[in-house]
Amino acid sequence: MIRRSLPLFLVLLASLLLAACAKAPVESMPVVDRDEVAMRLTADINVLASDEKAGRKPGTPGGRTTYTYIEKRMGEVGLVSGTNDPGSYWRLPVDLLATEPQSAQLILGQGRRRVVVAEDAAAVFTPRRRALAIGGPGTGVPVVFVGYGDGSVLGDALAGAIVVMLADPGRDAARRDALFRQRATAVLTVLPDNAALDEVRASEGQPRLQLAAEEVDNLAAYITDKAFGDFIGQRRWKGLKAEAEAGILDPLELNLSISVEGTSDRREFPSQNVIGMIPGSVPGSGAVLVLAHWDHLGECGEPGALDRICNGAADNASGIAMMLELARRLKAGPALGRDIYFLATTAEEPGLLGIRSFVRNPPFPLASIVAAFNLDMMAVAPAGSPVGFVGRGRDPQLDAVILAAIAKAGLAVGDQELADSFLKRQDGWALAQAGVPAVLLSSTYGSRAILDPFIATRYHQPSDEAATVELGGAIDDLLLHEALIREIADPAIYPAPAKTGP
């Protein structure tokens, strides 16, 4: 009796299981149609790299319409605000300071003698609109010669002084910073010759963009050895230098008057990082960060050229387009355990400023980020190209997952020496310095045969146009990131790494 009923029981059980499966289908990743993906990437790249965006330079109308477009697209792909600030839905303000040296004057005096140092023998730089320092006998401001030292033996006694120091290549910047930390009013560096002065002008005399929060208020002057020695007397000057070189010189107050004046064109303005997110289903399990910089150089072609706009299609309209498509695919697929943040940074080109601002004031704890993926210059290589792995060797757990995913995708790891050379030149470096596991995975950096022709003919040039991008390798990279993020976003598969600090 029991034996005859068993098959009927199994049939009923199988029917119930099939019915349950019909009500709760197994979740799967979205189907990949590379042509459709290419079409969506192209649409975003065409907008971001259009002449209407004028090169996406921060602080310009093109820059403002760029981050407005990114906000719109984040909403369209289904993201929610990642600012964690109800008063600012998409935007994380980044206050920037642009400066450009304008005029300079250095005057030396002794007794009744006054000499305005010739322009070809001196230079003065300040971030202020106008800075003036006067020191010497009768002013209450001492002029102190420290030789090759940094004045640290004087401590607070250096406050307010004008300091004269000898150039010592490789140490000058650190010594100058130390003097300003001791509240020196101005620092005059004596350079060996006019060639050294020309080098200083080439580096310090250019327009500069920096975070307003990182401004260092100083007044730095430079003079050639000959010009300084001619004024105070070559015999006396040789004696002072000899003592400094012998290491027997104590900081010495000079019977010398110095007037240092500099002006600068100065503009403070806001730009914006833009951030959206996909909330995870497992609160408190950490976050994955995907980032790409939206800015480029504006007009950087040769004066008088027919086309001066550096559109930055590969660098980095392609990274923003990939980030938006990646967000769309992740949002459309199975639920993700961890929060996924998508950050479009400003002002990467002048020195990773947008990401540095993010690190200074993150909208969520940096320690909660289990992995960060930077997307930069993604549309250069053809399909099947080796993957450049920038940031390898800094987090063994993340490395292992990435290497396994690359192999599973049927791709090869590219030239590691080439990839390593870009470690400090991309936004992920600022995150890594703050202790965040951050990588850049791109077929662009996989081999010199792919990268070098791009660098030579299109990188930071008007020729980096939307029509020239190559999406084959970019789509490979996109799908690699999607698979990786789905795995890392699952706290049961990828445990949060132990934090050891930066």
Image (tube, rainbow, N blue to C red):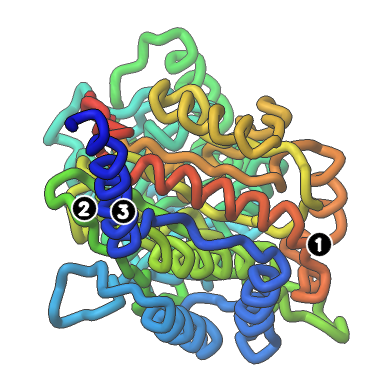
Q: Position of residue 47 (x, y in %)?
A: 63, 84
Task: Tell which circle, 1 or 3, labels the residue nearer the N-terminal end.
Answer: 3
Give the residue type that dot 2 points to: Gly
User: How far is mark 2 from mark 1, CA to CA?
Assistant: 59 Å
Task: Tell which circle, 2 or 3, labels the residue nearer the N-terminal end.
Answer: 3
Q: What residue appears at the point 45 percent right and 22 percent down from the top-left corner?
A: 240
The residue mark sitting in front, 2 or 3, is 3
Q: Regarding mark 2 in the picture, which secondary structure is present there?
A: loop
The residue mark sitting in front, 1 or 3, is 3
Query: Is residue 112 visible in this depiction of the protein?
Result: no
Q: Is residue 387 left or right of residue 400?
A: right
Q: Position of residue 434 (x, y in %)?
A: 30, 39
Q: Residues within 10 Å of mark 2 (few under 14, many from 20)?
A: few
Q: Is residue 268 left or right of residue 321?
A: left
Q: Regarding mark 1 in the picture, which secondary structure is present there?
A: loop
Give the residue type that dot 1 points to: Arg
User: How far is mark 1 from mark 3, CA to CA?
Assistant: 62 Å
Task: Report which residue position mark 3 lands on.
Answer: 15
Task: Report which residue position mark 2 lands on.
Answer: 138
Q: Which mark is residue 458?
A: 1
Q: Is residue 337 left or right of residue 418?
A: left
Residue 423: quarter of image? top right
Q: Quadrant of the C terminus?
A: top left
Q: What residue appears at the point 48 percent right and 64 percent down from the top-left corner?
A: 329
Residue that lies at the very extreme toward the front in this rendered image: 1
